[in-house]
Amino acid sequence: MLAALISAFAMTLIVGLRYLATSGFFAWLTQKVRPGLYAALKPQIGREIKWSLLSAAIYGVPAGIVTWGWDTQGWTLIYADIADYPVWYLPVSIFLYLLAHDAWFYWTHRLMHRPWWFKAAHAVHHESRPPTAWAAMSFHPWEALTGAVVIPVLVFCIPIHVGALAVVLAIMTLMGITNHMGWEMFPKFMVNGILGNWLITATHHQKHHDAYRGNYGLYFRFWDKVCGTDLGLGHWKLHSTGDSSHHASSGIDGQLT
Ligand SMILES: [Zn+2]
Ligand SMILES: [Zn+2]
C-alpha cells in the first residue's frame, strides 16, 4: 500500500515535470518563432500553469497506482517482451489507443459544453484567450479527472507494448501542447491537404477556442465530421497581437452545443 502511494506521488512529480519541460520548451520556441505572441498574456499564463500543475496531480495518482499494479501485482495488459504479439500489432495498438482516447474526448468534451458542465468545469480551459503552450493541461479538476482515467482504463482493455505506450503518451503530450500554442507548426500544404483533413492540429483546435463550440475532437476530425460539428480550419491573423477582444462577443451563447 505504501509502495502504491509512493508510486502515485512519483508519477505526479513526473507528470508535473514533464509538463513544465515540454510546455516550457514550446513556449521558448514560440518566443523564437513568433516573438511577442505571449507578451500580453502573462497573467493568463500564470493561471494556465496553476491549473496544469493541479491536473498533473490528478493525472499522476491513477497512473502511478496502475504502474505499481503492473510492476508488482501483474495488473494490466501492458507487455514488455516484444515477441508476445506480432510486430504489426505495435502500430495497430498505438492507433487503437488514439482512436479510443479521441472518441472518449470528443463525447466528454461535448458534454463539457453543456451549460451546467461548462460553468462548473470547462470554463477554466476556455479562460485561455487565446491559449498558449502552457494551456495543454489547464483544466478544472473535474475535467482533469475525465482525462486522467483514460489511459489507466485502456491498459486493462487493449494489450500494448510498454514502448508503444510511451509513443501514445508522447503523442498525447505533444499534440496537447502544440494544438494550444497559438501558431501552426506543420507546413501549409500538410494542414490544407489530406493530413489536415483528417488529423487535428493547432489550426483546427484554435477554431474551437475562437468559436466556443464545434471542433470538439482531440486527434482526428472523424467524430466532428460524422456528427456535423466540424467548423473547418481556423485563421491565425486575429491572434498576432494577443488581442482577445474579438472573443468577447462569441462567449456566452457559444457555450451551447
Ligand atoms: Zn471546449
Ligand atoms: Zn483546448
Image (cartoon, helix red, strand yellow):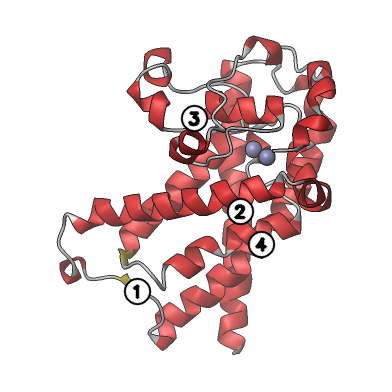
Question: Mark 3 CB in 8 Å range of ligand 2?
Answer: no
Q: Dot 1: few (<14), some (14–19), or many (≥20) neighbours within 10 Å? A: some
Residue type at mark 4: give it.
Leu
Give the side of residue 26 with respect to residue 255, left or right.
left
Q: Dot 2: few (<14), some (14–19), or many (≥20) neighbours within 10 Å? A: some
Q: Is residue 106 above or below residue 6?
A: above
Q: Is residue 196 above or below residue 5?
A: above
The answer to which of marks 1 and 2 sits earlier in the sequence is: 2
Residue type at mark 1: give it.
Leu
The answer to which of marks 2 and 4 sits earlier in the sequence is: 2
Q: If the image is split into quadrants, where does the C terminus sit?
A: top right
Q: Dot 3: few (<14), some (14–19), or many (≥20) neighbours within 10 Å? A: many
Residue type at mark 3: give it.
Thr
Q: CA distance from mark 4 to mark 3?
A: 24 Å
Residue indicated by mark 3? 201
Q: Position of residue 242 (x, y in %)?
A: 75, 18
Q: Position of residue 58 (x, y in %)?
A: 67, 63
Q: Tell me the element at label 3.
A: loop
Residue type at mark 2: give it.
Leu
Q: Tell me the element at label 1.
A: loop
Q: Is residue 8 above or below residue 201?
A: below
Q: CA distance from mark 1 to mark 2?
A: 27 Å
Of marks 1 and 2, the one in the foreground = 1
Residue indicated by mark 2? 17
Can residue 85 be spotted in the picture? yes
Residue at 56% x, 17% y is: 33
Residue indicated by mark 1? 77
Residue at 41% x, 81% y is: 75
Can residue 13 be spotted in the picture? no
Where is ligand 2, by quadrant? top right
